[in-house]
Amino acid sequence: MTYYITTPIYYVNAKPHLGHAYTTIVCDTLTRFHRLVGDESYFLTGTDEHGDKIALAAAKEGVRPQDYVDYVSSHFKVTWPKFGIRYDDFIRTTEQRHKDTVSRFLDLVNRKGDIYFGEYGGLYCVGCERFYTERELVGGLCPDHKTKPAYIAEQNYFFRMGNYQDWLIDLIRSDPSFIRPERYRNEVLSFLSEPLEDLCISRPKSRLEWGIDIPFDRHYVTYVWFDALINYITGLGWPEGGLYHRFWPVAEHCVAKDILKPHAIFWPTMLKSAGLPVYRHLNVHGYWQMDEAKMSKSVGNVVDIFTLRDEFGTDALRYFLLREMTFGLDSEFSYQRVLERYNSDLANDFGNLWQRSVTMLDKYLGGTLPPAALAELSQDSDWERLLRELVDGYSDDFRNMRPSEALRKAWDFVGHLNKLIVTEAPWVLARSVETLPRLERVMTMLVKGLALLGALVSPVMPGKSAELWRRLGLDPDTMSLDSGAISEALSHGRRISVGEALFARAEREESPKKAARAQAAAAPEESPAPSAELSISEFKRADLRTALITAAEPLPKSQKLLKLTVTMGGEERVIVAGIQKYFEASELVGKTVVVVANLAPVKLMGVKSQGMVLCASGNDTLALLVPSREMPPGSPVT
Ligand code: ME8
């Protein structure tokens, strides 16, 4: 199978920000996913360098337009690889190959009789580079730039777009996924329920010189949108060349909703007029917002992607963007959300799964999987079905542009494996030769599960996944989602290396107010009222275990908090508990209690607390929950 995906070509009047990075990372991820499943794939991005907006930006800088676009375009070009993005081609609309393609395309449309010369007066927004109808304006202003469009009347060339209205409506109706998600398909159909006007496709050179000449009238340049959309076939070498024939039929465009209309209406009708097939899908996402406004250079609320990358790393940033935004909907950006997702999903859920699994493998089985256990696991039909369903569901999500769903499914599997550790308690299985086969089976499930997870996250986090595979003794170049292939690779019995934390926890200085809130949340008397019902699966998310208190001391300057050191089956942790009022520190040492082991860590008065001790609370009294008979620390509470 073949796969072709494109980003919008970005205007060079601003440097790349988080919004541009999102679309480009989505396209890179999709390309990597398709390569992983064996599709021949091609990924095109680039820059849009003509038009009023760019000419004005260059004039403002006091430089020639060509020098200006060379400079900003190169900035885009070198930025993307720093975010793990590997495009196959980077197209610039000022390149000769593109000018030739636009000329050829215009000739075809002209020969078809779809271009005429006429006069038009209308309201023009320079920011959008397009005319607006009255009904599209909001309070007389451009809905995107909030500026008043200027009235411009001039003689120009027009494309008979209106002729293709019925054809376009039929096309969109007959192919429900042509524009997706559905909300944007409906938006376009609703727009098309009104008569479609022809499109002005030129600008007189007397007003704007910075553009591609109209081949049949040298006094005019091509309207920037007509020029820009054609990049998607220039990049494939249309009309000659194998790339065009191989990839154009499967073209996937990925854009945000700001440029829905040019992609959903101008572009298909242009292609139809020129006698070319249309693209396969238009994939439309929402906006990254800050304080509920679209993040954009003109509003000045853009997030610096380099700062985020330096703090969290490329892979974690990519994970955040793809997991956090539901493709198609707007998403509010906050630094706090990045921090929370990083710590909970990556450092805690995924990172701890890795660390606990390979540490135990090292400790109990000498760091290698017994090949017999691997072979036996492959015969376990329930386990194999679980893996197959996971891979199928995840692949289906990527194929249908639901990257956040694909990741959610991978994280459900992370949860499943974490739960396996808790329910199987390998540290207990390791105590007797009788339970050795079960221990080997559980460790094999964990390691194979981790190898599969590495492959599942590889399109999003290529760096971390390759590292994970290397630590498992596997060659990242042979990464695969196929269970048989993973077992075969693991069966060579290489020693697995534990290494440092995959995702070190990100700490941030907490504001006193926030620390106070966290402290209040930890105090038993202020715990929220229990909610009405809890499903078994929700309850099972809680990792409850027995823990032996080995040390206890009051936290300096705190009236409420005790710092407890506990051990849980070879693992030592600190838990800060709001129980000082009810217990002497010394009476707690040596007690075996029940703790919630997978609670997101919090910092309380400068001490990181990793868990919660369970107590029964009564009228101004508190009792520790203790096992009714002696149980080893780390035993699961089920
Ligand atoms: O429109 N949230 O270029 P452009 C999400 N040159 N995505 C965002 C975003 C945000 N806040 N801000 C920008 C143009 N984007 C034309 C395209 S294509 C033939 C010509 C992303 O530099 C998103 O992909 O204004 C959006 O569609 C694109 O940047 C607009 O980039």
Image (spheres, helix red, strand yellow):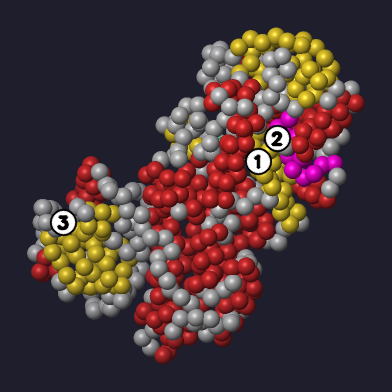
At numbered mark 1, what does the secondary structure look like: helix, strand or loop? strand
Using the image as rendered, state which of residue 563 and residue 271 is in the foreground: 271
At numbered mark 2, what does the secondary structure look like: helix, strand or loop? loop
At numbered mark 3, what does the secondary structure look like: helix, strand or loop? loop
Distance, label 1 to label 3, CA atoms, is 56 Å
* Residue 67: % across, % down: 62, 32
Q: How many marks?
A: 3
Q: In the rendered image, is residue 30 in sight?
A: no
* Stretch of the chain drawn in magenta: 226-239
Report if residue 137 lies within the magenta region: no
Using the image as rendered, state which of residue 33 and residue 425 is in the foreground: 33
* Residue 17: % across, % down: 51, 38
Q: Say whether marks 2 and 1 touch (CB < 8 Å).
A: yes
Vertical comparison of 33 with 262: above or below: below
* Residue 551: % across, % down: 17, 70
* Residue 249: % across, % down: 79, 46
Residue 561's tag is 3
Residue at (42, 89) in percent of width and height: 434
Residue at (60, 44) in percent of width and height: 77
- For label 2, count other residues whose C-alpha is less than 10 Å away and answer few (under 14), some (14-19) or many (20+): many
Q: Is mark 1 within 8 Å of ligand 1?
A: no
Distance, label 3 to label 2, CA atoms, is 64 Å
Name the amino acid, label 2.
Thr
The residue wearing badge 2 is 93
Whichever of labels 3 and 2 marks the residue nearer the N terminus, that label is 2
169 lies left or right of 30: right
Whichever of labels 1 and 3 marks the residue nearer the N terminus, that label is 1
Name the amino acid, label 3.
Leu
Residue 46's tag is 1
